[in-house]
Amino acid sequence: MKRTIALASTLLLSICSFAQEHGVLNNAKTPHMNLKTIDIDDCRWTDGFWAEKLKQAHEVMIPNLGRLMDDPEIIHAYSNFKVAAGLEEGEFRGWSFTDGDFYKYAEALAYEYAMTKDEKINQQMDEIIAVIAKAQRPDGYIHTKIQIGHGIAGFLHESAHPFKSDEKPYTNGPSHEFYNFGHLMTAACVHYRITGKKNFLDIAIKASDNIYDHFKEPSPELARIDWNPPHYMGLIEMYRTTGDKKYLELTETFVDMLGTAPKDRLDHRGMDHSQRGTAIREESKAVGHAGHANYLYAGVADLYAETGDQALKDALERIWTNVSTQKMYITGATGPHHFGISNHAIVAEAYGQDYELPNIKAYNETCANIGNAMWNWRMFLMNGEGRFADIMELIFYNSAISGISLDGEHFFYTNPLRFIEGHPQNTKDEGKRGEFMSVFCCPPNIIRTIAKMHTYAYSTSEKGIWVNLYGSNVLDTDLADGSNIKLTQESNYPWDGNIKITIDSKKKKEYALMLRIPAWAEGANIKVNGEKQDQSPKAGSYAEVNRKWKKGDVVELELPMAPRLITADPNVEETRNQVAVKRGPIVYCLESKDLAAGSNIKDIVLPSDIKLQPKYEADLLSGVTVLEGEAKILPNEDWSKQLYKPLVKTELKKTPIKMIPYFAWANRGVNDMSVWLPLQY
């Protein structure tokens, strides 16, 4: 469904013309992505899982996020911009990356406006953008921490005031300038494509031009400060939106700088922390800060999509294989360590070594998990391979939404796979989501992701429509030849594997429905107008159903959803002789709240032949399908003042268990929890 935008100036007409041809409304002209994204408002969830999440985003999540961002005693993000703009007296408060988190909030507002057309949101965005514009220096630089400095209030422009700060621009990577700039660019491009207004985009253009002026001829010292890189994705979006090739060239410059920084002295963290130790074209493993890494890999994928640099694609494939087969949790999460070691240097929120996947102390920052989904989304668009879409979906249903409570107002920074109250190795959240966390990057990230979940549901290609996510929704989109396609999807997915798609439009020529058959869905079958198709859909791929579709045609897809016990590679020491449980895309866990009185989660053992029965409970945890069965339980022993003692063979007793989706844990108070449980053969 193409959107006509009324434009006021020749420049805006020029930008919009390029944008429509080159991907601001979709990626129709991006040469090395074979699949194209749908327009932002082409799909709308109508019922079920994601419809409920999106409704909550509009009614609770985004308003609450705005309240936190606006409160000078909590996040202080909006106040920082007002102080930098000279609209308020005060000092900089918060972290150096707080600006970027505020831009993510602005992006979520834009998605909300796209779906609601609420004029109050449009006005709110204009007010926010006006403040940001006033805070921006005439040369385009904007970073409130550096502009305000410590104790410098009312700083507006360098031309009006002497530059006073503890830092100068582009001198210190951990100041997160590029993190902030990247989220500014992305939010501004999204706002422009939704509203057609250029006020936010103008700010991003000035900021991007400022970066270009400083980095068009980079030095090795400048290569040192490339830190936390959403700007790779942001600059490519700027190129797609404006058509200005210098933004594409600048992204190439940043990619080429990786691995060139001088190594004669270490940063306060090593070069691997932000993937600067090795040239990306030579890299074979995921290293360093997992959040930084996943943003980088997503940005490099965007660069490949525009340039076709095969060395970049080859490197991404090597790194992806390393992550997916040796460094990724069963939930799609990445980054097991709060602090890890890489090349003899400390790395925060680190990827760690191969097969290093601890459970109770697993860090798994929510942002890193979302970054993994963003990276896999781009890899999928390159060629339509189901393996990438499977991981994207795995993250969305598990390690992404686990970062936000069912009430939409409390958040996890970390996402461990095991929690025992009082255990000395627990991660910092201690089994309880907080209304506020001092490092507040994850809440706006998961909320903006939920707000745009409909944009991931479908893709298009010359073949036709690709169905990536299942659930009740309507789609109204255009194919590359200009023909309009409308369809309605009905499903109670992820609790049910039955999907019904009704064609609501007619096209004279044949086109395909490409139905994703997840890797777990062995034995799937497809019917068209009640007739079973001859093809046997292959798990982990897309099934192509090609015909001349007419209005009223119905496609039915059945995805088997039997609960399955999952084992891990034996090189993962922490899960040897243990199993996890999956049903469909959902990873399950056991929470002590659901055990028999007096039972301890540390004593539960799953028999290899356990029969787990799905049961939907509408009144539990906002409505979830639980798995009920009969496990075994070890005797409760006294371990006080001893670390080891002889084994006494005991006949294990039976005990009933009820497993819940992992994303829903810690919503009924603080309870012990485990995804992996000991196995009895």
Image (cartoon, rainbow, N blue to C red):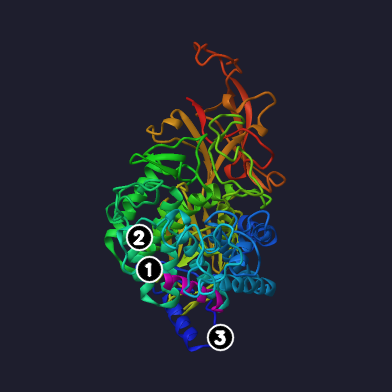
Q: Residue 208 magenta-drawn? A: yes
Question: Residue tagged by mark 2?
Answer: 222
Name the residue type under label 1: His
Q: Earlier in the sequence, mark 3 or mark 2?
A: 3
Residue 624 is labelled as none
* Three-letter code for the amino acid on which mark 3 is drawn: Ala
Q: Locate residue 567 relative to residue 113 in the image: left or right.
A: left
Distance from disc 2 to disc 1, alpha carbons, whole Å, reads 9 Å
Location of residue 497 in the rendering, given as x and y in whole percent from the top left corner = 55, 51
Which residue is identified by label 1?
214
Q: Is residue 457 left or right of residue 593?
A: left
Find the magenta span and give its range. 197-210
Work out how far the residue at label 3 is from the one at label 1, CA to CA, in angstroms: 35 Å
Determine which residue is flagged by label 3: 6
From the image, give the main secondary structure of the stretch colored magenta: helix
Kind of residue at disc 2? Leu
When asked about the image quadrant of residue 335, the answer is top left
Q: Earlier in the sequence, mark 3 or mark 1?
A: 3
Coordinates of residue 344 in the picture (x, y in percent): 34, 39
